[in-house]
Each structure stands twice: as C-alpha cells, then as structure tokens.
Amino acid sequence: MHAEPTAVLKILSDPTRRAIFERLSKDGEMTVHALTDPSGVSQPAISKHLAALKLVGLVHGRRDGRETYYSAEPKALAPLIDWINFYSSFWNNRFDRLEDLLKRMDQ
Amino acid sequence: MMQTMMQATDTKTLIVEREMPHSLEKIWRALTQGPLIEEWLMKNDFKPVVGHRFDLRADWGVVNCQVLTVEPNQALSYAWEAMGLKSVVTWTLTATSTGTHLRMEQSGFRPEQQQAYEGAKYGWQKFFAALERVVGGLS
C-alpha cells in the first residue's frame, strides 16, 4: 500500500525529517536515542518526526523490549517516481549532446 | 519538441523530436557507432545487429537493451529495460530540405504502481537529489 504522493512530499519537505530518513537509509535500524545523539535536535522532536515518517510508511518501527528500533522503507518513495518526467529531461539532455557531437563531426 | 500520448493499451509513449541540419547518414552513424553513442548517450557495447543484446551504463544505473530493428539511415529500435521499466526506444530519421527530422519514441510506460515500486527499489538513492529539488519547489 502506498501513501499519496503529495502526503509523502509534504512529510519530506522538512529538512530534519529528510535527514532522519536518509540516516536510517544509510546506517540501518536505529533507536530514537541513537538518532538523537549527533543531531542536536531534542528527543521529543525526533520522536515527533519519526511518527510523521511512519504515518506515510517511510519509516517502520520494531519494538524490542523497552526500545523501538526504526528503519527506513525506501519503497514508500514509489509514488513519487515518475518515469515519463525522468526520461523527458533525460532525452532532451541527450538530444542536446547529440547535436553538439554532430557539429563536431563536421570537421 | 516533446509530447506524451496515451495508447489504447493504456501504456504511455514519450516522443522527443528535432530538426537537425545534418544528413541522414551522419546522424545514423552517431546513433549506431559505439564510440559515438558513448559521446552523447552512454557507455555501451552496441552493435547494429538485430537480436544483439547490449548494456548502456550511466551514473544512475545500467540499461539492458536488445536491438529490435535496423533499417540503415531510416529506423532503429531497441528494447530498453532499466530499474523496473520495460520499454522500447525507436529512432526514426526522415530527410527534410534542410537536413533530417529525428524522432525518438519511447513506449511502454505503464501506469501501474508495480513499476514505480520496482523503480523505487533500485533507483531511489539517485532519485533523492531530484526529489530534493521537487520538494524545494513546493514550499
């Protein structure tokens, strides 16, 4: 199941949430404490951000004893991926490069 | 010029086309010779032989391709599979009074979630930079 693209974008429009999501994506599962330490953001604030990320499925929480371990769910980015848009800019860029090459081939 | 259209089969086709002041033969060379393809498209092991399988390598990933049509100076098409997208890229060259009309058609964009899901699995890291720009534009 996927959240609405706009909901996912709204959640990620906050730089702190984006940083949390990226960190979980890179470093794997983490507790709120581990996430709080280097960030300079308070633990309640981190918890709030995690709840927002969980709401749209970007983050998953696993409870183990008294700790909850959070991990990223990059698949939740799926609704944002628009191949037509991606390839529109891709091909236009490549057509430019092709034209440059053709000019050079004149020599 | 650029357009997209919806096909009866419910897949979308992306079309990019341009007038170029160059001969058919010259453009054909740029589309079909490996070292030239690398200069404007991607690193490759392309051969203009129907059935030949080749890879295109970009910084955002590898595209698995297979040559489908080779009509010298007229048309070239290959299957284009990357990050969960299965599509076909078709090049059509038409002579004009000033050179060549070059048309690229990429067909097979499905609206299904599955495709985006696969793409997300493979491509999301590269995608993040682009996402940041989109998100930045929202606020």
Image: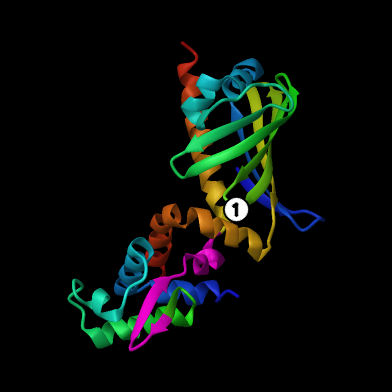
Residue B93, position as x, y percentages in the image: 69, 27
How does the figure colour the protein chain or chains? rainbow
Q: Position of residue B84 (x, y in %)?
A: 61, 52
Query: Tag 1: residue type?
Result: Ile
Q: In this view, which residue lies farthest toward the right?
A: B8
Task: Look at 56% across and 48% down and name the residue there.
Answer: A88
Evaluate whether residue A59 shows in this view. Answer: yes
Residue drawn at point x = 49 percent, y = 78 percent: A56
Left or right of B120 on screen, residue B85: right
Chain where mark 1 sits: A
> In x, y percent, where is residue B91?
68, 32
Tell me, yes or no, if residue A99 can be seen here: no
The N terminus of chain A: image quadrant: bottom right
Question: Looking at the image, how many numbered discs can be counted on the residues?
Answer: 1
A66 in the magenta segment:
yes
- What range is drawn magenta here? A62-81
- The residue to which callout 1 is attached is A84
* B93 lies left or right of B134: right
